Image (tube, helix red, strand yellow):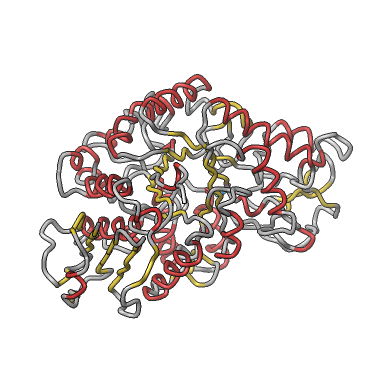
Amino acid sequence: MNAKWWQNAVIYQVYPRSYCDSDGDGIGDIPGLISKLDYIQHLGVDAIWLSPVFKSPQDDNGYDISDYQDIEPMFGSLEDMRRLFAEAGKRGIKILVDMVLNHTSDEHPWFLEAKQSRDNPKHDWYVWRDSTPDCPPNDMLSCFGGSAWQWCEECGQFYFHQYSVKQPDLNWDNPEVRQALYDMMNWWAKEGAGGFRLDVIDSIAKEPDNKVTAEGSMLHPYIREMSKSVLQGTDLVAVGECWSANPDRAKLWSNPDGSELSMVFQFEHIVLDQVGWEKWNLAPLPKVKLKEVIAKWQRELHGKGWNSLFWENHDVPRIVSRWGNDKQYREQSAKMLGIFLFGLQGTPYIFQGQELGMTNAPYELEEYRDIEIRNMAAERLAKGYTMESIMESIHAKGRDNARTPMQWNDGENAGFTTGEPWLKVNPNYVTINAEEQLDREDSVLNCYRKLIALRKSADVFFDGEYTPIWPEWEEFFAYRRSNGKETLTVIANFGEGELNVPADLFAEAGELCVSSYPDANSNVLRPYEARMYLKK
Ligand code: NOJ
């Protein structure tokens, strides 16, 4: 089987408002990102997934778009974006633009027209239902709290919004909507985009009358239509965000025949340390279950689809604070988590700062900026939750944990801005920063650099078949991947005790390529010790 470029790639996610600020307004921007392309190239990644920089009122930090074909001035201009494509291209790096196709901003001209009257030609571009102002069509809830229906005075109807009231859902059942979105995507491809990350793409074919959001009956037909109209016959990569994915659906989404997308983000591992679907209700991580979930996805998609591999993004907390130890063993556990992830089959994603072992942000409620955090706190306070329990949830799961400014150096504001940062810099930037790690051989950053380079060094990363090793042993996270010629062995201690590993495991393993401790040579795995071996 021939690999597609993105099957041997590593993708780095940039959350632009927190990456690098070039003009001192406290918000990261495209020229700032361009100034850091050498750093990104030095990491060795092949592509950048750039969170939205399109024109937007920023109600949800850019996931509320008011013009898909222009750039929000706080991030720069269309010219800056073109320069970014060109400068990244010179360094062999593609740019994936983040397409929010499920909804627009309520300030998008389409919506401004749509809400004017029921017979406006754009009216049917959104999802409307009749009722009286005090009686929403049904009890569906928005992901950011409150009803999913908002009364619109102008046209005297409710509109549907799965996210904030400023993010009205588009009506994908209208073919004009679909065509306008495909045309816009083709325009970005012509401009130089290397692909797309597709926001909540499994929710586009909503059926609110049946209370269906994800996986509506027309979802896959629409995706196949998009694939034909935009993706097929190109080398664009398309990764969909699919909270509803299970392995069977993921095999459709990432069918090797290219009929849908390249791959999807699935979240089965991400929801393990919570109660049901409620992310704010915390639960301990069931480690054996985590291994089962990973093994299932590795097994099921092998040869039949393609996995996205990730621990972090702008919506989930920092992995070292979540499943590692961000104090005593911060470096070891950050590296362990990277090593474990990078041996798996799929395309690895690194969220900015993950390569430094950046940690969650221990702030007061007023210091967070995220709409989801603010709405949840207000809702829970009104329901009588204690402030203590609300803060515990935010410190563990709040989205701003990952969105704090990138820590470049130990200077003012971590070198992120000369102004007032839009979200406070994590005070630990004095010790955790890129400058300190660049030339230190055993840094988290250099561990990620090694892992990225290793992915290109042997076919087994692409095609090796996954076999778990002693999956019932709770803290021992280990697997082997083999393609008949090469064998990759990854072993990790996912805890703080010592683990005695039977010696015969090492006899077969081959050469040690990377580890989370500099002197990894005994049969005992120390806290968060991980090693990757390769036998050619
Ligand atoms: C998923 C995005 O990743 C998240 O940040 C955003 O709030 C929602 N989709 C709505 O667009």
Considering every residue shown, the one lying at the far top of the view is: 79
- Tell me the quarter of the picture where residue 187 sits: top right
Q: Residue at x 45, y 62 (%)?
A: 270
Q: Residue furthest right?
A: 119
Residue at (46%, 40%) from the top-left corner? 49
* Front residue (pair 92, 286): 92
Q: Position of residue 189 (x, y in %)?
A: 57, 30
Please state if 403 lies on the left or on the right of 534 as rendered. Answer: right
Q: Observer-nearest residue: 387 or 314?
A: 314
Q: Is residue 366 visible?
A: no
The total of numbered circles placed on residues is 0
Instruction: Determine whether 468 is above or below 420 in the image.
Output: below
Q: Image point 45% across, 21% down: which residue?
A: 83
Q: Quadrant of residue 323?
A: bottom left
Q: Which residue is nearer to you in this view: 529 or 329?
A: 529
In percent of width and height, residue 253 lies at 59, 54
In the image, residue 490 sits, relative to residue 185, either above or below, namely below
Question: Quick check: 340 left or right of 17?
Answer: left
Q: Does residue 36 appear to the left or right of 504 in the view shown? A: right
Quadrant for the C terminus in the image: bottom left
Q: Is residue 428 above or below residue 180?
A: below
Q: Residue furthest bottom?
A: 472
Query: Residue 527 at what x, y percent from top left?
Result: 19, 68
